[in-house]
Amino acid sequence: MTTPKITYFEDLAVGQEASLTSKVSEADIIAFADISGDRNPVHLDAEYAASTMFKERIAHGIQSAGYISAVFGMKLPGPGAIYISQTLNFKAPVKIGDTVVTTVKLIELFPEKKRAKFETVCTVNGKPVLTGEALLMVPSRPA
């Protein structure tokens, strides 16, 4: 496995963006339920899910939030970045077979603490399914 490029705090500039595209599979939802312990039947039981407002099984909302973490850890800023906080606004369900495009955009820098604030958005077919903001601690370039 190739280690992704590290972007140091000094290399960041407001407006930088990175994205990741992920297709949600039934296996992903089952694995997430197993890892998290969240076995809500809306995620796992088609008959139950059909009786809900969604009419079919949906992915865990936090699974989409995990895609945000993947962008931060693997693309921008990349290895060494540490989550401080994240707001999450769930706008629409994500279903089996959906392709989620996750984009993070740098909106503010805090040099005194080496922190960076990002706008975070997950979309399906161009429509937001999750929005929020994240604050990360980003490593400085080694001396």
Image: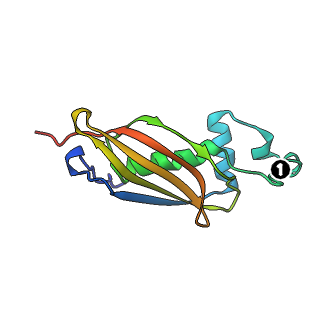
Residue at (39, 58) in percent of width and height: 18
- Dividing the picture into quarters, in which one does residue 139 lie? top left
Residue at (80, 41) in percent of width and height: 41
Q: Is residue 57 left or right of residue 130?
A: right
Q: Is residue 140 left or right of residue 95?
A: left
Q: Measuring from the top left, give residue 53's x and y in whole percent.
A: 83, 50
> Which residue occupies the foreground of this view, 9 or 70?
9
Q: Secondary structure at mark 1?
A: loop
Residue at (51, 45) in percent of width and height: 132
Query: Farthest left residue?
Result: 143
Q: Measuring from the top left, give residue 49's x and y in whole percent.
A: 83, 48
Q: Measuring from the top left, give residue 138's x and y in whole percent.
A: 29, 40
Q: How is the image coloured?
A: rainbow
Residue at (67, 44) in percent of width and height: 60
Q: Measuring from the top left, give residue 8's x and y in whole percent.
A: 23, 46
Mark 1 crowdedness (10 Å alpha carbons): few <14, some 14-19, many ≥20: few
> Which residue occupies the foreground of this view, 35 or 74?
74
Query: Farthest bottom residue?
Result: 125
Q: Is residue 140 left or right of residue 18?
A: left
Question: From the image, which quarter does the C terminus lie in?
Answer: top left
Q: Amino acid at mark 1?
A: Met
Question: From the image, which quarter does the N terminus lie in?
Answer: bottom left
Q: Is residue 58 left or right of residue 24?
A: right
Q: Is residue 78 visible?
A: no
Residue picked out by circle 1? 53
